[in-house]
Amino acid sequence: MAALSTAAAAHPHIFVSTGLTLVRDEGRLVGVEVVWQYDEFYSLLVLEDMGLDADYDGTLTDAELAQLDGFDMNWIEGFAGDLYAMQAGRAVRLGPPERRGTTLSEGKITSRHFRPVEGGTAGEAWTFKPYDPTFYTAYDMGLGVSGPDGCEVKIVAPDIGAAQEKLLAELAQIPEDGESDYPQVGEQFAETVVVTCAAGS
């Protein structure tokens, strides 16, 4: 019962629709533009916390947009940006974010940033996973993926049933005093983006 109660209270608190645009140069992946569209409730909390859109008309002035831009770019050292890249089974580091603008539409904040790829080789398949290890934030690929010409993109859904079973099993290991970190299960719930590019394209 305690594990079930904890699981019910531990669902994601922020929901983000994600979009990726992959950028290649001379056959090598050089970067990825990331779009984050926040859910309406979290967007409202951000606007209220920053004192923006005081008249609640859903429209921001240029000055307010400038103030909002980059609100989610103050990353602590070591933060991976909730986006993980691999090639040929090896983790590939993504560089620090470069702002690409922030907008507000239909009550949702959408921000864009670019991450350079540091390493990687031509001709190998890539995988990308957007997730928060703590599962406080839930990401989905609702905004899709745009790949370069000559590349095939697949989005593979997670096995939600298996992920939930793993979560419950790990929660059951938490002592009754609760003095333990919440299990890092975000990856289990993450969609996987698989990118395969034709040789020489």
Image (cartoon, rainbow, N blue to C red):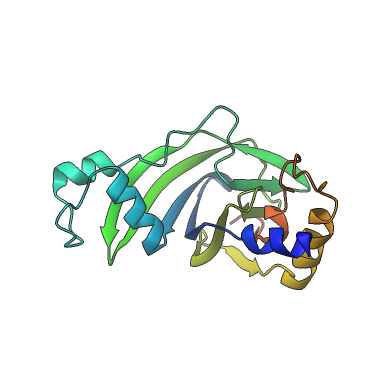
* Image position, residue 41 (x, y; %): 38, 61
Within the image, what quadrant is residue 71 found in? Answer: top left
* Image position, residue 163 (x, y; %): 76, 64
Compared across the picture, whether 188 is left or right of 25 comes to right
Q: Quadrant of the C terminus?
A: bottom right
Within the image, what quadrant is residue 137 found in? Answer: bottom right
Q: Name the outermost residue toward the bottom.
A: 161
Foreground pick, 19 / 133: 133
Q: Name the outermost residue toward the front.
A: 177
Within the image, what quadrant is residue 108 found in? Answer: bottom left
Compared across the picture, whether 21 is left or right of 94 comes to left
* Image position, residue 109 (x, y; %): 34, 56
Foreground pick, 105 / 135: 135
Q: Is residue 69 above or below residue 44?
A: above
Q: Residue at x 35, y 56 (%)?
A: 43
Compared across the picture, whether 130 is left or right of 181 comes to left
Q: Residue at x 66, y 64 (%)?
A: 8
* Image position, residue 132 (x, y; %): 61, 49
Judge whether residue 75 can be spotted in this image: yes
Foreground pick, 94 / 51: 51
Foreground pick, 180 / 161: 180
Judge whether residue 197 can be spotted in this image: no
